[in-house]
Image (cartoon, rainbow, N blue to C red):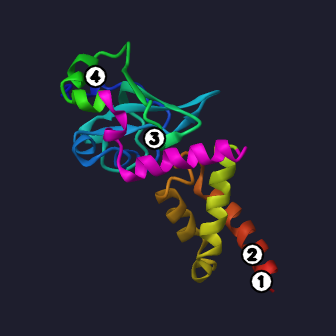
């Protein structure tokens, strides 16, 4: 694997989701391979595979990582499609090293790289696109559903925010007090509906 020195680390990049290291199967995740969030394109979805430096894997957010490759998934079928394609990154100082660790069968069938969590994230993106909704809209609905299902935590919105962050439904980048405010407003609406 690449060297583990500060001078080799790339500049901070967009933070990965909290569960980024759980979206790929255990052998790959143990080596530090992770994914960026699913990105909807015109006729497909794209998921970037990245490698997170070992000393930076402890606590999210993960902002320093190296590009490994890109998985393209046809939008109409999502995880059910048999036409997934994986391409190694064209640029990146460690791509030749990463080629040694990504098995040829995983390149031939990129679905084999993903864990059930990773497949679920892709299916969420596909469902949102098929239902005409945006991925963020689907995330908002998931947030609201989780908040509604946890009335015992309504007096502790900060705990709900932590749970939503753990689920990848809130960004670590956004200040927590803004997220607590948002959760509190949703709780007020839910209490008004129940009253």
Q: Which residues are magenta?
A: 108-133
Q: Which residue is mark 1?
A: 194
Q: Quadrant of the N terminus?
A: top left
| Measured Cα–Cα span from mark 2 to mark 1 | 6 Å
> Which comes sooner in the sequence, label 1 or label 4?
4
The picture places residue 4, in percent across and down from the top left corner, at 21, 30
Q: Are marks 4 and 2 in contact (CB under 8 Å)?
A: no
Q: Are marks 2 and 1 in contact (CB under 8 Å)?
A: yes
Of badges 1 and 4, the one in the foreground is: 1
> Which comes sooner in the sequence, label 4 or label 3?
4
- In the image, 112 versus 30, the foreground residue is 112
Provide the secondary structure element on which disc 1 rests. Answer: helix
The picture places residue 120, in percent across and down from the top left corner, at 47, 51
Residue drawn at the location 75% of the way across and 67% of the way down: 185
> Which comes sooner in the sequence, label 1 or label 3?
3
Q: Which residue is mark 2?
A: 190
Magenta segment's dominant SS is: helix
Q: Sort mark 2 into few (<14), some (14-19) or many (20+) by Cα contacts within 10 Å.
A: some
Q: Are marks 4 and 3 in contact (CB under 8 Å)?
A: no
Q: Residue 42 falls in which quadrant of the image?
A: top right
> Which comes sooner in the sequence, label 2 or label 3?
3
Question: Looking at the rendered structure, which numbered label has been put on residue 7?
Answer: 4
């Amino acid at each position: 694997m690449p060297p583990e020195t500060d001078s080799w680390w790339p500049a901070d990049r967009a933070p990965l989701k909290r569960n980024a290291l759980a979206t790929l199967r255990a052998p790959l995740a143990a080596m530090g391979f992770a994914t960026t969030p699913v990105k909807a394109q015109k006729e497909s979805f794209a998921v970037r595979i990245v490698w997170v430096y070992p000393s930076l894997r402890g606590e999210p957010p993960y902002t320093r990582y190296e590009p490994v490759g890109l998985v393209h998934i046809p939008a109409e079928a999502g995880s059910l499609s048999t036409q997934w394609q994986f391409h190694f990154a064209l640029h990146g100082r460690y791509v030749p090293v990463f080629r040694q660790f990504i098995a040829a069968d995983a390149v031939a069938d990129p679905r084999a790289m993903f864990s059930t969590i990773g497949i679920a994230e892709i299916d969420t993106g596909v469902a949102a696109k098929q239902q005409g909704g945006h991925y963020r809209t689907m995330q908002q609905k998931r947030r609201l559903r989780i908040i509604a299902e946890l009335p015992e935590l309504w007096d502790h919105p900060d705990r709900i925010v932590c749970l939503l962050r753990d689920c990848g439904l809130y960004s670590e980048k956004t200040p927590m007090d803004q997220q607590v405010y948002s959760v509190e407003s949703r709780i007020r609406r839910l209490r008004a509906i129940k009253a």
